[in-house]
Image: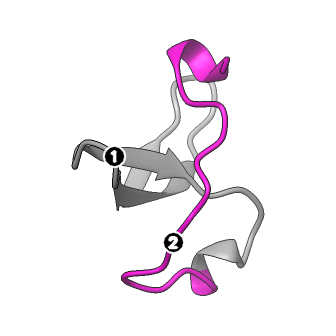
Amino acid sequence: VGVEAKQPNSAIRKCVRVQLIKNGKKITAFVPRDGCLNNIEENDEVLVAGFGRKGHA
């Protein structure tokens, strides 16, 4: 999933759709660093950090 950045940036951020085990909700999570998206496969378990308002836990 590509998420466009707000102005003045024009980058497309690399994000993934993640389904939470606890309640089954689907969220969009940002993937840091270049190339990390290549390591995540379907049905992999991932750690979601900074969950909440504006990235503050």
The label nearer to you, 2 versus 1, is: 1
Q: Which of 33 and 29 is in front in this view?
A: 29
Q: What residue type is labelled 2?
A: Glu
Using the rendered view, name the quadrant where residue 32 is placed.
bottom right
SS at mark 1 in the image: loop
The answer to which of marks 2 and 1 sits earlier in the sequence is 1
Q: In which quarter of the image is the N terminus?
A: bottom left
Residue position marked by numbered label 1 in the rendering? 22
SS at mark 2 in the image: loop
Q: Is residue 38 left or right of residue 6?
A: right
Q: Which of 2 and 11 is in front in this view?
A: 2
Q: Residue furthest front?
A: 22
Numbered range of the magenta stretch? 38-57
Q: Is residue 5 left or right of residue 42?
A: right
Residue position marked by numbered label 2 in the rendering? 45
The spot of residue 52 in percent (x, y) is: 52, 20
Q: In this view, does 1 lie to the left or right of 41?
A: left
Check if residue 33 falls in the magenta segment.
Answer: no
The spot of residue 26 in percent (x, y) is: 26, 48
Check if residue 50 falls in the magenta segment.
Answer: yes
